[in-house]
Amino acid sequence: MSTDVGASRRRDVGNIDRRPVGLRETRGGSIYRGVFLDRIRFPSPAADPAHDLACFCKYCQQLAGNAGLDLAFVQEYLQRVLQTREGKRAAAHCFLSGSRTEAVEESASWLEQLLAFRHTSITAMVKAAAELASARGLKVGLDCYSPSLAQLVGQDLPGLAKHCDWIKVMTYARAYSPASIPFEILGLANWLMAPDGASESRSMACLADAARWPLPSRREVVRQGRLPAEILTAEIRRGRAAHARQLLAGIELVEIPHVAELSAEQIKADSEAVLAGEPDGVVLSWDLWQIPLDRLESVSPLYGR
């Protein structure tokens, strides 16, 4: 059965490639109507922010210096503070909520300034790329982290929304892979716990408080993708509050052993949670080739199509 489906899909793709039917030329003669910008971010530092919170190269130091920020000092300072239990807790709140806790207020201040600089850097890059595309009459779409995780990687949704036509947020609550909610949250949880850090339950409670999510107290539950569906509603609403233009919710429907294993009941609950957040649309993610055809058919009525 899988071989026949694959052959059918290949034939369909081949037909589309050979026929110009339905492909209208835009201004400038291109068959494309827009561009989709992916990987517009810094690498996620969730696994170890004290080590992976990039970038501190000489070029970034120069740009930061022009903005009045001593990046070399910030790097040295945070490397020390982010080894402490209090510093980690304050950082978790900055990463997930954008606000500091009362503890270690000075370190939170420096971290906020660094995150603001990262926002500026990514937004400037996207602005330059979007202007090139717009000058050629092309629409611009962006691929961004889920709203509560976006600050981790330097994505400022309100700032980015000014330079695009739509934003797809990766509201992946089931899959365990980079950029998904379970993967990034567990990275932070493990960091809070090791070495000689907070207990598992305290670490998860810290992250739940920072993200304002109903997180379970055990990491394994998160690892299995068993998060409350209401997190999806909260994330889409936060994207709305961030004034993201044409906000599209990315929902994983792939089936990959040990990465994304879904059930009909969970897919239905997720669709109800997504619709409650009132996105402008839904993007079935992330790899069409990995989504069973019967699943594509089953979700169509769930989203009113």
Image (cartoon, helix red, strand yellow):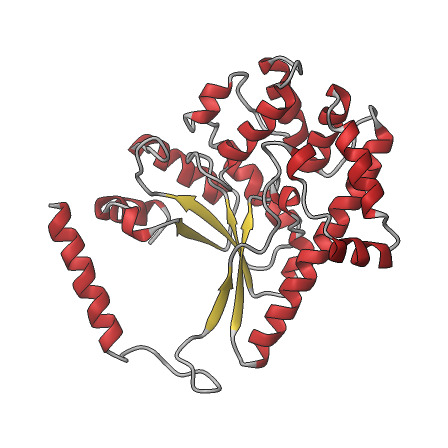
Residue at image coords 51%, 50%: 279
Q: Residue furthest front?
A: 58
Placement of the N terminus among the 4 image quadrants? top left
Percent of width and height locating residue 84: 75, 22
Looking at the picture, tell me which residue is in the foreground, 208 or 150: 150
Placement of the C terminus among the 4 image quadrants? bottom left
Looking at the picture, tell me which residue is in the foreground, 243 or 35: 35
Percent of width and height locating residue 20: 28, 80
The image shows a total of numbered marks equal to 0
Q: Is residue 103 left or right of residue 1?
A: right
Percent of width and height locating residue 109: 84, 37
Looking at the picture, tell me which residue is in the foreground, 194 or 10: 194
Residue at image coords 58%, 15%: 200
Looking at the picture, tell me which residue is in the foreground, 3 or 23: 3
Percent of width and height locating residue 3: 13, 49
Q: Quadrant of residue 113?
A: top right
286 shown above or below 10 = above
Q: Is residue 207 left or right of residue 268?
A: right
Q: Is residue 302 left or right of residue 72?
A: left
Q: Is residue 201 left or right of residue 68?
A: left
Q: Quadrant of residue 132?
A: bottom right
